[in-house]
Amino acid sequence: VIATLLPGTIFSLGMKSYARARDMIDTGVAVALATDYNPGSCNCDSMQFVITLACLQMKMTPAEAITAATINAAYALELGDKIGSIEVGKQADILVMDMPNYQFLPYHFGSNNVEMVIKKGELIWSS
């Protein structure tokens, strides 16, 4: 079982109480992050913003939020054997961002830092 958290929905609906991700992680619960991308509750498709909310509002570390948005999300969708990490035999879906290191990700939510997108091993976009 993987708890899938939707911090963008809480933000979009103007609610004040975010999921207690820190407590879940500290007790060993696997956590995934998603946008919900639903016009009625969260018309946001930015995973970068979701990761920002997870770090700033739900007290996740950048590494935990990236794990929750990638490999844990893949397993929540029962696709962990195909996507979610960079391994031999997986699809090689890779996003390259322009920032000093992954720890800066939560603090660059207002701009698009994507430099390159690789899908199934093929370059599909580059700045």
Image (cartoon, rainbow, N blue to C red):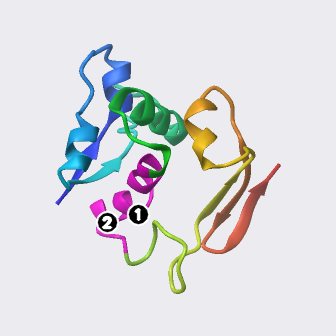
Snapshot quadrant of residue 8 = top left
In the rendered structure, find residue 75 and report the number of the disc placed on it.
Answer: 2
Please report the residue visible at 24 percent of the width from the left and 21 percent of the height from the top: 17
What secondary structure is the magenta-colored segment mainly?
Answer: helix
Residue 69, compared with residue 118, is above or below; it is above
Q: Would you say the residues marked 2 and 1 are in contact, meaning their CB atoms lie under 8 Å apart?
A: yes
* Viewer-proximal residue among 75 and 40: 75
Q: Which secondary structure, mark 1? A: helix
Q: Residue 85, labelled with which disc?
A: none
Asked whether, in this view, residue 14 is left or right of residue 89, the answer is: left
Horizontal side, residue 100 vs residue 5: left or right = right
Report x, y in % for residue 71.
Answer: 41, 63
Q: x, y (%) of residue 62? A: 49, 44
What residue is shown at x 47% (from left), y 39% (from top)? Answer: 51
User: Which residue extends farthest right?
Assistant: 127
Q: Amino acid at mark 1?
A: Ile
The residue carrying pointer 2 sits among few (fewer than 14), some (14 to 19) or many (20 or more) residues within 10 Å by Cα, namely: some
In this picture, which residue range is highlighted in magenta? 64-80
State the SS at label 2: helix
Residue at x 20%, y 56% (from the top left corner): 28
Three-letter amino acid code at the position of disc 2: Tyr
Q: Where residue 100 sits in the image (x, y, percent)?
A: 73, 45
Residue 69 on the magenta span = yes
- Residue 110: image quadrant is top right
Which residue: 35% across, 39% down?
36
Q: Which mark is residue 71?
A: 1
In the displayed orientation, state which residue is furthest to the bottom: 89
Q: What is the spatial separation of the Cα atoms under label 2 and label 1, in whole angstroms?
A: 6 Å
